[in-house]
Amino acid sequence: MTADDSFGRLDDDDYPAYTMGRAADMLNTTQGFLRAIGEHRLITPLRSPGGHRRYSRYQLRIAARARELVDAGTPIEAACRIVILEDQLEEAQRINAESHRSNKPASTPPAA
C-alpha cells in the first residue's frame, strides 16, 4: 500500500489508523483499558506487520461508549456486554426499518 492509498482511506471508519497510544490519548484513558476491552472481546484491534495494535474510528467510538459506562460505575465486563447488546439492537433496528421500507406496497390513488 502506498502513501497515496493510505491517505485515501482516512475517511474510512473501519481503517485501522490509530496506534494504541494515540487511541488511549484520544479517549483520555489508559492502554490497559484498551487491552481489557479487547480481552472481553468488545473490540479486536488489527495488528500492524510489527504486531502493534491498530484501532479504527469505529472501534474508538465503541471504546468511548464502554468508557462512559465504566466511568459511571459499571464493571468493565458488564459495560462490554451492554455495548455489544446496544450495537446488536441498533443493527436489528436498521434491518427492520429496511425491511419495512422494501415491503411497503406502492401507493394507489384513492377510489373515485
Image (tube, rainbow, N blue to C red):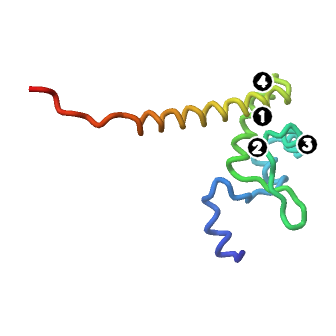
Task: Please tell me whether residue 48 is drawn above or below residue 3 in the rendered image.
Answer: above
Label pair 2/1, CB-CB below 8 angstroms:
yes
Earlier-in-chain disc, 3 versus 2: 2
Label pair 1/4, CB-CB below 8 angstroms:
no
Q: How many numbered circles are shown?
A: 4
Label 1 residue SS: helix
Task: Give the residue pinned by disc 2.
Answer: 27
Residue 92, given in percent of the width and then of the height, sits at 59, 33
Which tag is nearer the camera, tag 3 or tag 2? 3
Task: Give the residue pinned by disc 3.
Answer: 32
Rounded to the nearest whole Å, what is the CA distance between mark 3 and mark 1?
12 Å
Rounded to the nearest whole Å, what is the CA distance between mark 2 and mark 1?
8 Å
Earlier-in-chain disc, 2 versus 1: 2
Residue that extends furthest to the left in the rendered view of this protein = 112
**Three-letter code for the amino acid on which mark 4 is drawn:** Ala
Earlier-in-chain disc, 4 versus 3: 3
Which tag is nearer the camera, tag 2 or tag 1? 1
**Three-letter code for the amino acid on which mark 1 is drawn:** Arg
Label 2 residue SS: helix
Task: Give the residue pinned by disc 4.
Answer: 72
Q: Nearer the viewer, residue 30 or 86?
A: 86
Task: Please tell me whether residue 51 is drawn above or below residue 82 in the rendered image.
Answer: below
